[in-house]
């Protein structure tokens, strides 16, 4: 029994129409949430707007040579696929599902169905 549903929101028709910053990141408003998008090796990733450590705006950071997201405040590094902190501090970055479909780019947010827990 799965307790989670994913609600999908269209971000754009394609990644080329998005207003990427020079660091290949941008802030997007999706489904009422502010998130960060990044393009790494021609693949789009979606994750939290702010760093879980000290709330640095991640779109103001950069992508390092190995493809990690780097916070602008304290240089904490995160794997864009699973959100794991790779510089050793133990934090996890919230990562969102993202799909590039024929109809466009979609970001998915997990929603928990709390009613089903009590059935």
Image (cartoon, rainbow, N blue to C red):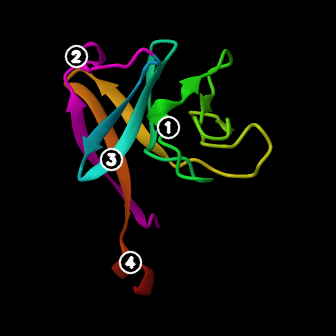
Q: Earlier in the sequence, mark 1 or mark 3?
A: 3
Report x, y in % for residue 50.
48, 47
Label 2: how many residues lie within 10 Å, few (<14), some (14-19) or many (20+)? few
Q: Earlier in the sequence, mark 2 or mark 1?
A: 2
Report x, y in % for residue 91.
68, 52
- Please tell me whether mark 3 or mark 4 is closer to you in this view: 3
- Which quarter of the picture shows residue 5? bottom left
**Marks 2 and 1, how far apart at CA:** 21 Å
Q: What element does badge 3 sit on?
A: strand
- Residue beneath label 4, please? 114
- Please tell me whether mark 2 or mark 4 is closer to you in this view: 2
Report x, y in % for residue 58.
50, 37
Q: Which is more toward the observer, 99 or 57?
A: 57
**Marks 3 and 4, how far apart at CA:** 24 Å
- Residue beneath label 3, please? 34
Q: What element does badge 1 sit on?
A: helix
For this view, does 5 lie left or right of residue 71? left
- Residue beneath label 2, please? 17
**Marks 4 and 1, how far apart at CA:** 31 Å
Where are the magenta residues, as a range? 1-22
- Residue 45 drawn above or below residue 96: above
Q: Which is more toward the observer, 10 or 58?
A: 58
- Which quarter of the picture shows residue 38? top left
**Marks 2 and 4, how far apart at CA:** 37 Å
Q: What element does badge 4 sit on?
A: helix
Q: Which mark is residue 58?
A: 1
């Amino acid at each position: 029994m799965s307790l989670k549903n994913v609600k999908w929101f269209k971000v754009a028709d394609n990644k080329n129409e998005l207003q990427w910053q020079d660091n290949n990141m941008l802030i997007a408003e999706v489904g009422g949430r502010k998130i960060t998008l990044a393009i790494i090796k021609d693949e789009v990733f979606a994750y939290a707007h702010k760093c879980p450590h000290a709330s640095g705006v991640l779109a103001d950071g950069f992508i390092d040579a190995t493809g990690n997201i780097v916070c602008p405040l304290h240089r904490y590094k995160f794997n864009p696929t699973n959100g794991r902190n790779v510089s050793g501090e133990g934090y996890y970055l919230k990562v969102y599902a993202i799909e590039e479909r024929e109809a466009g780019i979609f970001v998915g947010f997990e929603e928990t169905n709390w009613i089903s827990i009590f059935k």
